[in-house]
Structures are given as C-alpha cells and as structure tokens.
Image (cartoon, rainbow, N blue to C red):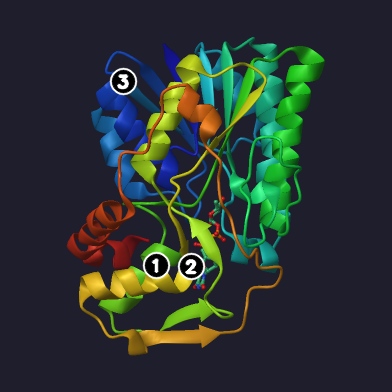
Amino acid sequence: MKVLVTGGAGFIGSNFLNYMSSEHPDDKFIILDAMTYAGNHKHLITFRKNPNFHFVKGSITDRALLEDIFKMGIDRIVNFAAESHVDRSILDPDIFVKTNILGTQILLDTAKKYAVERFLQISTDEVYGSLGETGLFTEETPLAPSSPYSASKAGSDLLVISYYQTYGLPVTIIRCSNNYGPYQFPEKLIPLVIMNALNHKPLPIYGDGLNVRDWLYVEDHCRAIDLVMQKGKVGSVYNVGGNNEKTNLQIVKMILAELEKPESLITFVKDRPGHDRRYGIDATKIKKLGWQPQYALEFGLKKTIKWYVENQGWVQENM
Ligand SMILES: Cc1cn([C@H]2C[C@H](O)[C@@H](COP(=O)(O)OP(=O)(O)O[C@H]3O[C@H](C)C(=O)[C@H](O)[C@H]3O)O2)c(=O)[nH]c1=O
C-alpha cells in the first residue's frame, strides 16, 4: 500500500505517521509538506531514517509537483495539509482560502486523474459552527462555520463531496474535535498554556473562559483515521470526538494543578471575534465501526504535559 500523507510534518500528520509506521510496517508513505511555520523540522530526520518514508517539500497547491508525486503510484491519500489556527485566520484569511480550499481542489483533481483507491479528508467539528448548552454535532448537522478557518474547511469538505457526487472519486471525510498531544504548535490552547506556565508567563483566556471544547488525545484520532481508511464507507462522513467536554478554564486549571503553578497566572483578555461557544461530538457512527477512545483526558493531559516539560528547550527554540 502506498499512502500519500499531505501535511505529514504537522501536528496530527506526524503523529499519524508515527502511529502508522508501527501499525502497518509494510506500507509506504509519501509525505508532502510545505514546511510552513507549523511544519516540524525535527520530523524530517525521522522521515529520512525510515526506508518506508519518502519526503517531498511542497504545497498541495502545486499541481505540477502533485503530478510528479502521483506518477510514483499512490493508492490512498490522507489530506492533513491545512492552515489550522482560528486566530491567524481572523488576521489573515487569504492563505486559508488558498491552501484549504484551492489546495484541496487541486489535490482532488489530481487524485481523480490518477484514479486513487481512497481520498480521506481530515476535517474538523468547527465546520458545524457553535452549539448551545445542549445537543451534539452529528454527521447530519448543517454546516454553519463561524471563522474564516472553519469556513475554508467547510468549503474544502463540500468540494470533497462534490468530487464524489460528480466524478465518483472514492472519498471519505473525518470531522474531529479538538486534538491535543505531543508536537502541537504552542499557539493552540493546551501547548500555549503549558509553555507559558512553565515560564511563569500570563495565560491569556479569551472572554469568560467558559467556552467548551471536546478534547481528544491525538493518538485516538490517528486510530480513528486508520480504521476509517480500512472500513469507512465511501462518500460518508465520520465524526470523531472524545466525549471530554471541558470549559477552557477547567482545562487551564487542570494544567496548572499538574505543573503545580498558581492560578494567578490566568489572565482574562478580550474575546476572540465570532468565538464559538461550545463544540460537542456524537461519535456513534464511528463507534459502530469499532472505534473507542483509549485515553482518558486526565491521562492524556499528563502524558502531554510530561512531553512538553521534557522537550521544553527544544520547543522554545524550534516551535
Ligand atoms: C489560543 C487560545 C485559545 N483560547 C480559547 C479559544 C477556544 O475556545 C479554545 C481552544 O482554542 P484553540 O485555538 O486551541 O482551538 P479552537 O479554536 O477550538 O480550534 C482547534 O480545534 C479545532 C477542532 C480545529 O479544527 C482547529 O484547527 C484547532 O485550532 O481556547 C484562549 O482562551 N486563549 C488562547 O490563547
């Protein structure tokens, strides 16, 4: 099996490659990554050492490069490549449209031309917008994105579905809740709070800190992707979530308690514009395929904090 993994040097992509290389040691992986600020150079050393990995630096918007890659023979694609930070999308939406929408369309087009066996799109629960105090996102929840980031992901999801409906491209979409774990860029809440707390810096909490996210340890997401790649239905969407809904304040306090740092570091700042209040996932559909999260939030968070403590110097210099 030859799998093209786009965005493989990013947070979820690199954890996925790590997981897959131990679960499927005979598979070959072509890794395409633009190595933007979020692409991790440390991974390139690992990629080079693994004979099953072939790394290509470049963007999914580069059609000629994609042609060269597909000529190597690709059976499946897992598309992680995306700009992913909501705050950056508010400041500078252009690159989100370019990479997430245009890039996905060019990748789909090339996948169609070379008749791949499966195109797996890694999406997000943010495409559904915000929930009130009750209810959960199902795969049938209408798309109602709030930020340029989530709108660009919703746009790419619609393109993915259109390539199935129009051209019969065998696509599947995974929409996952907030991931956390090693190698996450410290602009996202959990790694930012860990790194700031370690350095006794203020922890910026948007608004009242009562926005809710459903947290999932990244390895549980990787296991879900692997399963959907094998058993997921073509043309279908699968929601993935950990059933770990917490307010941002709860998460921050858990981190501070683990690090034995004072809650006085918490600093309330101006709210994010268009800030979604709550995300919550109904993962019944993927559970029917046999998936269950294996990491309790407390355990996953401890493991993540330990990783950032042990790699603190490196994270500061490289991320
Ligand atoms: C960076 C930061 C965040 N926050 C709040 C904003 C959110 O309510 C929550 C998590 O924020 P973060 O930016 O880490 O993640 P989301 O905006 O929920 O989006 C994330 O999860 C989805 C599924 C994706 O698809 C995104 O790619 C991913 O970035 O903490 C703060 O209060 N202070 C901060 O400094």
Question: Looking at this view, is 109 or 153 the one in front?
Answer: 153
Q: Which amino acid does the dot numbered 3 rest on?
A: Asn
Label 1 CB less than 8 angstroms from ligand 1 = yes
Say few, some or many: other residues with alpha carbon within 10 Å of mark 3 (under 14 / 14 to 19 / 20 or more): some
Residue farthest along the left direction in this orientation? 310
- Residue 247 circle label: 2
Mark 1 lies on residue: 251
Q: Quadrant of the C terminus?
A: bottom left
First-in-chain label (3 vs 1): 3
**Hey, which residue is sitting farthest right in the picture?**
166
Q: Position of residue 297 (x, y in %)?
A: 33, 54
Residue at which label 3 appears = 52
Q: From this view, report whether residue 169 is shown above or below residue 155.
A: above
- Give yes or no for contact between labels 2 and 1 (Cβ–Cβ under 8 Å): yes
**Residue ID at (68%, 52%):** 150
Q: How far is mark 2 from mark 1, CA to CA?
A: 6 Å
For residue 51, say whether it is visible: no
Q: How many marks?
A: 3
